Amino acid sequence: MPDYWSTLDIDLHLPVDSGAGRRNGLEDALREAIRDGRLSAGTRLPSTRTLAAELGVSRGTVSAAYDQLIAEGHLVARQGSGTRVAHTAGAIAASTIADHGRIPPVPVRHDLRSGSPDLSRFPTAAWLRASRSALNRAPRDAFGYGDPRGRIELRSALTEYLGRTRGVLASPDRIIITTGVQQALALLGSVLSASGISAIAMEDPYIPLFRDAVRMSGPTVVPLPVDDFGAQVDRLTTDAFDGVGAAVVTPSHQFPIGSTLSPSRRQDLAQWAQAGHLVIEDDYDGEFRYDRQPVGAIQGIAPEDVVYLGSASKTLGPGLRLAWMVLPSRWVGAVTEAKQLADHHSETLGQLTLAELITSHAYDRHIRSSRLRYRRRRDLLADRLEPRAGRPLTGFALAGIPAGLHALIRLEPASLTEAEVLTRATEYGLAIDGLSNMWLSPDQRHNRPQAIVVGFGSPSDGAYPAALDALVRTLSWT
């Protein structure tokens, strides 16, 4: 009859057959639990003495079972850290479930995908100091259910910060904290749909996940073309955009094209908004401008007709799940209600910590140092891709580098195709993004420009040179 056993450290609940040899039964139970994922990689197992006492067997029986699984690679044992499930065992189990019958992918050695900062540069010490200070001063009600808009401490800090650095006209009562720009767009989409707005224009190309969030919330998404001067705002007044009540734009640094909305188009967009429409301004990469002062937010021109979106995903890290929107007064009530229905409110501790980081100006200092570091990386990327004697790098053009954490590499018709570049990148263990997957209309992709998107923010300082080496080899086609 099987025995079900657990320990004070972890709750295993593994059936061990008490009929045949206890060692074999224990081996089989552990092996099966690792393979089906009940024991995940890194899980610490009980000591041989503890487990033997609980099962009522000799310590030698447990030791023999552990030794066999260590020899098979399922477990690892290190002095001082006990016996744990091997990470390779977990990876094998996961790949067996997810990729049964498929050829394993080439491992990623160099990651130049867009969308993330250098996470190794997260300001851990400053965050810990801010967190400790915020917790010491936090009122008792901070750990209960609160305002769906978010903590007043963070909304007040953002009011001052956004006004000072981005020219945003805000007040704490018009700011709502969300778990990301994706959630902000989903909330806005549902509210706008309920108000009668059935179509929203979104830049094309753009982040597919954001586009899907709007589409799934109700409205139809209408593609708004983008060129080297940003979104083609004049299209909004054409017959093709009849019925479009709102537009999502990235004026500071369009993703993935990398253009900045021209001054004349900024004015045209503000006028379109003031004519009875709503502009949703995704301030993508707004803090990272290298060649001149950052361009102020359009929201500062028309605060009652523009929703401003920002986040800490690029400045600190996406894992914090902290973003914000500054709303025109007429939309605050409906969006607050939608946020409450979605998840009541965003988590509190991160909000309090970020508020302290901002008010102590540690956030400003971190962004300044990050801006210098990413500028050096941008310059190194441009230098490495510059054609010169002995380096057969031709057939492409670098674009979108005055700001942000990514660059667009446009491929000329006579050079490698986008698919060929991505295939070669895989052979070198390099992860990069293709432009094709970011267009709204898949059936028209073959008529669109060929390009790849390179994120120079995500690698660590030590890994970045090797990643550029892999990129240069990938693009060396002659």
Image (cartoon, grey):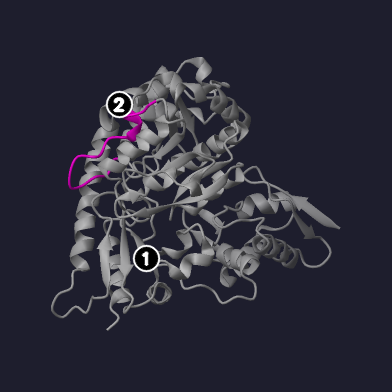
Left or right: residue 26 compared with residue 409: right
Is the C terminus in the top left, top right, bottom left or bottom right quadrant? bottom left
Q: Residue at x 46, y 57 (%)?
A: 79
Q: Main structural element of the magenta stretch: helix, strand or loop?
A: loop
- Res 131 visible: no
Answer few, some or many: residues within 10 Å of disc 2's Cα (few below 14, many 20 plus, some between 14 and 19).
some
Return the x and y of residue 125 as percentages of the image width and height.
Answer: 32, 37
**Residue bounds of the magenta highlight:** 287-303
Q: Are marks 1 and 2 in contact (CB under 8 Å)?
A: no
- 297 falls in the magenta region: yes
The image quarter in which residue 398 lies:
bottom left
Q: Separation of disc 1 and disc 2 at Cα?
A: 35 Å
Return the x and y of residue 31 as percentages of the image width and height.
Answer: 67, 65
Q: Amino acid at mark 2?
A: Gly
Q: Residue at x 60, y 56 (%)?
A: 40
- 117 falls in the magenta region: no
Return the x and y of residue 3 as percentages of the image width and height.
Answer: 80, 54
Which residue was labeled with disc 2?
163
Q: Is tag 1's residue or tag 2's residue first in the polypeptide sequence?
A: 2
Residue placed most toward the observer, 4 or 40:
40
Q: Which mark is residue 432?
A: none
Return the x and y of residue 187 as percentages of the image width and height.
Answer: 55, 35
Which residue was labeled with disc 1?
452
- In the rendered image, the residue lying farthest to the left is 389
From this view, report whether residue 337 is shown above or below residue 369.
above
Local secondary structure at mark 2: helix
